[in-house]
Structures are given as C-alpha cells and as structure tokens.
Image (cartoon, grey):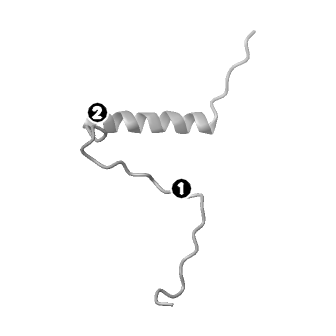
Amino acid sequence: MAKKKRITKKDLLKLEQAAVREERKRQGALDGRFREKVEKSKKTYSRKRKHKDE
C-alpha cells in the first residue's frame, strides 16, 4: 500500500500564491501595464532609526 503524501506548509503557500497570481493574470495586472510589487518578508527584523538628522 502506497504511503499518503502530506501537504506541507510550503506546498500550501505555493498553492495560495499560484491562485493569487492566476487571479491577477485574469484581471490583467501582469500584462505589462502595471509594475509588479515585491512584498517585503515579514520574517526579517528591521531596526528603526533613532535620529533622522544625525
């Protein structure tokens, strides 16, 4: 009997991103008229600058 393949978080993320991309394609967002947006990773920490002038 074959072992069932588990769906990992990575697989779920890929499926979700593919669905979002298909929706954007259908709306015409990826046909060259719009600039593609890169979403910043929320996993990285960025320290806030204390003083803007110095």
Q: Is residue 19 left or right of residue 24?
A: right
Residue found 39% across the figure and 37% down from its top: 21
In percent of width and height, residue 52 lies at 47, 86
Residue found 51% across the figure and 90% down from its top: 54
For residue 32, above or below residue 46: above
Inter-mark Cα distance, 2 to 1: 25 Å
In percent of width and height, residue 6 lies at 67, 27
Within 10 Å of disc 1 (Cα), the crowding (few <14, some 14-19, many 20+) is: few
Q: Earlier in the sequence, mark 2 or mark 1?
A: 2
Residue found 40% across the figure and 39% down from its top: 20
Q: Is residue 27 left or right of residue 45?
A: left
Q: Hey, which quadrant is residue 26 in on the image?
A: top left
For residue 49, above or below residue 25: below
Q: Secondary structure at mark 2?
A: helix
Q: Nearer the viewer, residue 45 or 5?
A: 45
Q: Nearer the viewer, residue 11 or 32?
A: 32
Q: Which residue is mark 1?
A: 41
Q: Which residue is mark 2?
A: 26
Q: Hey, which quadrant is residue 48 in on the image?
A: bottom right
Give the number of the disc on residue 30: none
Residue found 24% across the figure and 44% down from its top: 33
Residues at discs 2 and 1 in contact (Cβ within 8 Å): no
In percent of width and height, residue 9 lies at 61, 39
Instruction: Residue type at mark 1: give it.
Output: Ser
Return the residue found at the far bottom.
54
Q: Secondary structure at mark 1?
A: loop
In percent of width and height, residue 19 lies at 42, 34
For residue 34, above or below residue 52: above
Within 10 Å of disc 2 (Cα), the crowding (few <14, some 14-19, many 20+) is: few
Instruction: Residue type at mark 2: give it.
Output: Arg
